[in-house]
Amino acid sequence: MTATEFKNGIKEIKESLRGLTLQLVHANGYRPYFNLREFGNAILNEEVKGNDFKVNQVWTTDGIVGVKSIQHLIELIKTTTVTAIQFESFYNYKTTEEFIRSFGSLD
C-alpha cells in the first residue's frame, strides 16, 4: 500500500498499537520501535525515499500470523492478544523499465 494509505490505516489503530513492539524492515535491515513517536518518524523517513509499506507478520499469544492488509490487522487486534507487529518498507517500481534498470548496467 502507498505511504498515505499506510499512514491513514495506522492512525485508525493508533490507540491499539500503544505498548506493542513495532518492527520496521527496510533496505538496510530492521529495527524494533517501542513507542509510536519513533515509529512515526521512521515511517516519515521511509516515505521521503518514495517507499510503500506492507504488514508482514503479527505476533500473537497463539503464534505468528501473516496479515495482508490494515483491515485484516484491525480485525486481528480486536479478536486476539497481539504482542508485536512487523511492517516492511520497500520501493515499488512504477514501470517495468524502472524495475529492469534497478539491476544496473549489463556488461
Image: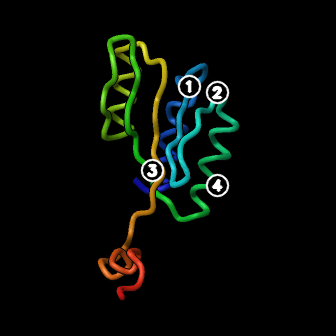
Q: Earlier along the polypeptide chain: callout 1 or callout 3?
A: 1
Q: Looking at the picture, how far across and down is residue 105, in whole percent?
A: 40, 85
Q: Judge from the rendering whether residue 27 lies leftward or rightward of residue 34; answer left or right.
A: left
Q: Earlier along the polypeptide chain: callout 3 or callout 4?
A: 4
Label 1 belongs to which residue? 21
Q: Tell me the residue at 35%/74% (across/down).
A: 99
Q: Looking at the picture, how far across and down is residue 32, in whole percent?
A: 58, 33
Asked if 14 appears above or below 40 in the picture, the reply is: above
Q: Looking at the picture, how far across and down is residue 19, in whole percent?
A: 60, 19
- Residue 60, numbered label: none
Tag 3, which secondary structure?
strand
Q: Looking at the picture, how far across and down is residue 2, in whole percent?
A: 44, 57
Label 4 belongs to which residue? 45
Label 2 close to label 4 by CB (< 8 Å)? no
Between the C-alphas of marks 2 and 4, the distance is 17 Å
Q: Judge from the rendering whether residue 38 lies leftward or rightward of residue 93; answer left or right.
A: right
Q: Nearer the viewer, residue 34 or 102?
A: 102
Query: Mark 2: which amino acid?
Result: Phe
Query: Mark 4: which amino acid?
Result: Asn
- Which picture quadrant has residue 18? top right
Q: Tell me the residue at 38%/70% (across/down).
A: 93
Tag 1, which secondary structure?
strand
Between the C-alphas of marks 3 and 4, the distance is 12 Å
Q: Earlier along the polypeptide chain: callout 3 or callout 2?
A: 2
Q: Tell me the residue at 48%/18% (across/down).
A: 83
Q: Nearer the viewer, residue 86 or 76?
A: 86
Q: Tell me the residue at 40%/64% (across/down).
A: 92
Label 3 belongs to which residue? 53
Query: Mark 3: which amino acid?
Result: Phe
- Residue 34, numbered label: 2
Q: Earlier along the polypeptide chain: callout 1 or callout 4?
A: 1
